[in-house]
Amino acid sequence: MDARALKEGIVSGRLDADALDAGFADLHAPLSDHEALVAADRCYFCHDAPCITACPTEIDIPLFIRQIATGTPEAAAKTILTQNIMGGMCARVCPTETLCEEACVREAAEGEPVQIGRLQRYATDTLMAQGVHPFSRAASTGKRIAVVGAGPAGLACAHRLAMHGNDVVVFDARPKAGGLNEYGIAAYKSTEDFAAREVDWLLQIGGIEIRNNMALGRDVAMAALQDEYDAVFLGMGLGGVNALTAPGADKEGVLDAVNFIADLRQATDLSTLPVGRDVVVIGGGMTAVDAAVQSKLLGALNVTIVYRRGRDRMNASVWEQDLAAAKGVRIITNASPVAVHGNGAVREIEFEFTDDDLNPTGQTFRLAADQVFKAIGQTLNGDDLPDLDGRKIAVTGPGRTSITGVWAGGDCAAGGEDLTVTAVAEGRDAAEDIHAALMRA
Amino acid sequence: MADLTTEFVGIKSPNPFWLASAPPTDKEYNVRRAFEAGWGGVVWKTLGEAGPPIVNVNGPRYGAIWGADRRLLGLNNIELITDRPLEVNLREIKAVKRDYPDRAMVVSLMVPCEEDAWKAILPLVEETGADGVELNFGCPHGMSERGMGSAVGQVPEYIEMVTRWVKQNTRMPCIVKLTPNITDIRKPAMAAHAGGADAVSLINTINSITSVDLDLFAPEPTIDGKGAHGGYCGPAVKPIALNMVAEIARTPETRGLPISGIGGVTTWKDAAEFMALGAGNVQVCTAAMTYGFKIVQEMISGLSQYLDEKGLNSTADLVGRAVPNISDWQHLNLNYVTKARINQDLCISCGRCFAACEDTSHQAIAMSEDRVFTVKDDECVACNLCVNVCPVEDCITMEELAAGAVDERTGRPVATEHGDWTTHPNNPAVRQAAE
Ligand SMILES: Cc1cc2nc3c(=O)[nH]c(=O)nc-3n(C[C@H](O)[C@H](O)[C@H](O)COP(=O)(O)OP(=O)(O)OC[C@H]3O[C@@H](n4cnc5c(N)ncnc54)[C@H](O)[C@@H]3O)c2cc1C
Ligand code: SF4
């Protein structure tokens, strides 16, 4: 075996460029014209289609697929984007196996749904490649709205508001817009800088100003926003990361999975990005799977996901779990970390098996680890926020918070799954509500 | 987005997509939903004369044929005209038209072949505020046995007579719906024209038996062990309808007579084809019956995208664009030479082109040991069969040989000038003229 692969510690250059390119290539290659026609042909054009209900943004899926089938992917794209302005990204990152495609009647009939996600990508890619932005702004309302966070929720909200003729200023703490589309989504789902290209395309609507490196609470205060703007939308996602409480968790090499992924997403040359030989990921969601799979693709020799409950409780879909397995990631379930061992840097991590109610069994085991990724959930950061519901901002209806004039949506708001598509839906619906409220005022 | 507003015999509708007179337009509930879904107009299900309504069978009235994946390609029906009382239909027509003044509301009629019958019903229709009437001379089953429907439509003299009665007794535009169950569609169209019709609509359904129950030995749909022929419609009939529309559009005697195109319109493309061949609008039935009213949305978005792409400002600019190119065989250019070309990058090596050409055409495709298929130019007559049977769109195409290039099959260079049968030396008429 290659010495680079066996090298202990967190090092870069475990794989050569070709292997890296192959690993990080598009997870689902785009459909060719022929494939798209064949795939579209399978849609039954169901009445009151279950896939529409299953899509958080309620895209008229049968209609857009029919538009593809009749040779008008541009019209299909418009159908998609009218409901979901990030239809391009959603087509790449939606866990369709638990959303639209799970509901497809052909999944019931044949165990093989219509490939909705890939068809959606076919349509939106076609339109975006033409550089067309199919929406235009209504006459100016003279209203100004502040949006906090340029992730899917904030951008969807901003776009809808701008379309209705409002002026929008988006504040984002990070140097680039896009939120987790830019910094979080697995690299093989958003290739060729798609997140940034989509933001540029979205901004073509006009009337949206993005102010980067501007954090709410640090560079701009909540009270000032309420003062200066006619309404405020909070879409700042979950900036914090849950802490690992096991003794030794402060040792070198124990890292937040989201930071690792953000570094990976921003790296211009993956061969310079270091990764451990023996990587252990703690968690059971999409972040855990993404950290594990991308470690493996960077050349880590042994990658293990350890989740404290049973497989059926993992947030990562079965499809995601299978993807991890196919890439050579081992998944251990019903085990909780109890100690991190090592002299300064982590060498081993010790787990105890737990039953489904997380009761310890007394049985422990150790895994060799020179890098440990914590993927045990993100948390909401910030002061002066509206009332919370649990650990997220409480909302009623389309994102109304406890503070009049302040709306919230996306991961930072309670309710809904933490998904890109949900964030888009919530941002869009809040925008409609904000606009209606401002027009009444 | 191109504006799809269409004017047909003076009747305006927001788009050229009307629902044909058929079950989808049989009652207020349906028509309101259709208008909500975006249909530009309807032709209300055919009304008969006052009195006890006709009755329908109480067993199955439809039969179908399917393509792969059970896609419905053809539908046949033995339903008759409306089986609801005349006054109920009239009341509903009036209510719907009042609420949807911008949509076309045409009423289909079929009453006995007597002037009084027509005189009686026309004022009642006028009173609803409907925009026009369509004379159902097409229905091929049931009513025809009673001297109506296609029994009238198959006799040009009757068509002309009834059309004249109608024109004399109403100010409403009159569309005559033609049956395809005749030999030459131009004759009934001319008769309608002569009678003063404002337009013709075609085609109505085609006489058909969709299938036979091989246990009962009875045609389907089977009613208590027996079956009757029905009327066939759906995507499968489109080519027949297109040809009939084209014949009327290009025949000098009927040229310029407005045509409402009917027969298998399922997508925007079908509609555009009918319109290019001269139809001023289209009527749809089977597609709505198969997929629901919502399909009109694809027709609308598709047609307007197409008009935009073509730089056409309105549907009127599309109507008839292909008519000058409808020709007789004798005028087709025999000096236009093409050869099949197989795109090896797209080819999936199924061999269907080979089977088709080798077994049934001109043995012009070669197959190598490793399943590479290539065209033999010295054998290819450009029949297009390989293109038609290939499962991959655009994998096999026809490439024109430039003038001067040698056609390897004949060994002769391709002539620059047009040359057709009328000037061909093998044509006995040409030979005679030369002698
Ligand atoms: C690793 C990972 C993988 C994922 N994979 C998928 C997937 O495959 N499919 C899927 O559907 N979902 C996935 N998700 C979830 C998805 O990314 C989120 O649900 C979605 O991005 C939420 O959108 P948002 O707009 O609410 O928040 P974010 O995308 O988090 O955007 C929030 C924005 O707010 C900014 N911000 C934060 N705090 C402040 C502040 N104080 N002031 C100003 N700006 C601030 C941030 O910089 C960021 O740009 C994944 C998440 C992670 C972490
Ligand atoms: S946005 Fe996502 S869930 Fe909705 S249809 Fe598209 S792929 Fe499916």
Image (cartoon, rainbow, N blue to C red):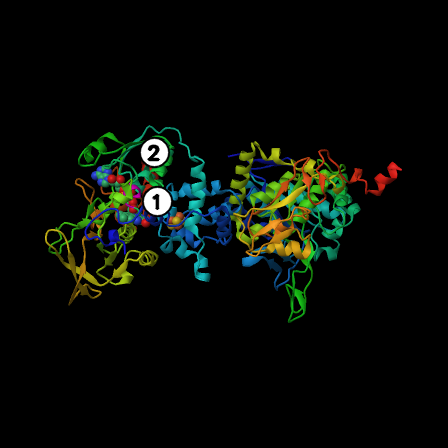
The quadrant in which residue A210 appears is: top left
The quadrant in which residue A267 appears is: top left
The quadrant in which residue A303 appears is: bottom left
Q: Which quadrant holds the N terminus of chain A?
A: bottom left
Q: Which quadrant holds the C terminus of chain A?
A: top left
Residue A28: x percent and y percent? 39, 50
Residue labelled with disc 1:
A190
Residue A181 is one of the magenta-drawn residues: yes
Whether residue B232 is visible, yes or no, is no
Residue labelled with disc 2:
A439
User: Along the line of sight, which residue is nearer the eye, A337 or A218?
Assistant: A337
A120 relative position to B300: left or right: left
Respond yes or no on whether mark 2 lies under 8 Å from ligand 1.
no
Classify mark 1: residues with Cα within 10 Å, few (<14), some (14-19) or many (20+): many
Three-letter amino acid code at the position of disc 2: Met
Give the residues in magenta: A179-184
Residue B109: x percent and y percent? 67, 48
Residue B348: x percent and y percent? 53, 53
